[in-house]
Image: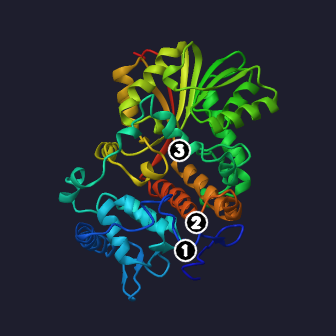
Amino acid sequence: MTLTDPTYQGSASGPLRVPPAPAAIDAEVWPGVARPPAGAKAALAGKAAGALFRSAARRLPLRVEYPNGSVLGTGDAGAPVMTMVRPDDFDVRIGDNGLIGLGESYMAGDWEASDLAGVLEVFASSVDTLIPVPLQKLRGLYLPRAPRQERNTEQNTRDNISRHYDLSNELFATFLDATMSYSSGLFPPDAGPLPDVGWEALAAAQQAKIDRLLDKAGVGEGTRLLEIGTGWGELALRAAARGATVYTVTLSSEQQALARQRIEQAGYSGQVTVALQDYRAVEGEYDAVVSVEMIEAVGYEYWPVYFQTIDRVLAPGGKVAIQAITMPHGRMLATRNAYTWVHKYIFPGGFLPSVRAIEGVTEQHTTLRVRERRGMGDHYAATLRLWEERFLQRAGEVRALGFDEVFQRMWLFYLCYSRAGFQSGYLDVQQIVLDRREAQL
């Protein structure tokens, strides 16, 4: 195995080829990746960041291998390996941009990993101790802030959503299953151990996830359903098959086009309206509201508006079922103003809530109350692993769509970064049911 031809081991379908380090990087397309920061200030920051990184790495259960032959970490022979290719560039990037630099350095090929999710899981498990506490308190002074144009105002949100979901329906089809569901599946016990569950179980797991949400929201014959966040239409299709009338909103023109096509082909055009509309502009009254992994794109300061909108349109006796990726409340508070690699390259304007935040926002700003929730983070880890394997298996198709090696490494980093969060327990995903029932005395 070489650094330009690494493989992932252990896939049921055989070795998976990792996108090679880019031979040349277009600086106009990838300005943050093409060249590391330069200048005296960057060099000084790089030296400090490199020293901090090496100090942390010595304590971590992995192996960090340097070109000079030195190895850091407490990991044994089976531990994840992070191979430094250009350690000086790595140091400068993380010194200039912190975790943004970590992702950009991988995109540039400054380091490699035969088990990328494994390396990132070690970092995620140690997130509270990687940086000394005194420096953590100063993070607001040296970490970048989110650009104002990425705040999720009604004027900005369409562009934020488009940067991710309008990349290409064909791209998403390369790694999603036939349901085109881009959220965690819910695997049954008979699918086998979640770390080993196979691709053939994913479509059924996605439908099971949707069916549970529809059941909890009481969706059936004659239900007036609002869906916030259409995706590519699978939930609307399954709700229509139950006899519901569905109004579903998205800000992605690509998603709207494919969802409408799928709905028409299934014969449900008369029951389902797919609107290119901000959730804040929805009018009318609905018996049920369902939203799958949409709150993450709303933005911290707009959570009250999101739930107030749901509260405003929900009919008396109605129910709400949402699926939300969550993080620990303390970490949420500490990072709510941070600008991260995920913001810059994947989800501009997004932010993950905590369960406590959802409960607090709904109690303070709406008549809705959380009545039930189910955590299923291990199911998301399994879902992401399957997406990752599929994406690598179909790398040729991704390249043929016009996505270069830098993009492919970016997307792989995103999938592995996400999976590491769930495998470490740093992230969870919850199905949450809300209604207006009075508390029982």
How many other residues sit within 10 Å of disc 3, few (<14), some (14-19) or many (≥20)?
A: some
How many other residues sit within 10 Å of disc 1, few (<14), some (14-19) or many (≥20)?
A: few
Answer left or right for 350 relative to 181: left
Q: Residue furthest top?
A: 316
Q: Secondary structure at mark 3?
A: helix
Q: CA distance from mark 2 to mark 1?
A: 9 Å
The quarter of the image holding the C terminus is: top left
- Determine contact: label 2, label 1, CB under 8 Å: yes
Q: Which residue is mark 3?
A: 163
Say which residue appears at 22% left-offset and 62% top-offset.
Answer: 132
Say which residue appears at 41% left-offset and 30% top-offset.
Answer: 153
Q: Which residue is mark 2?
A: 405
In percent of width and height, residue 158 lies at 51, 34
Quarter-of-image position of residue 84: bottom left
Answer left or right for 376 relative to 395: left
Q: Is residue 431 visible?
A: no
Q: Residue furthest left?
A: 134
Q: Nearer the viewer, residue 417 or 213?
A: 417
Q: Which residue is mark 1?
A: 23
Quarter-of-image position of residue 213: top right
Vertical comparison of 430 with 105: above or below: above
Q: Secondary structure at mark 1?
A: loop
Q: Residue furthest bottom?
A: 69
Q: Decide which of tag 3 and tag 1 comes sooner along the chain.
A: 1
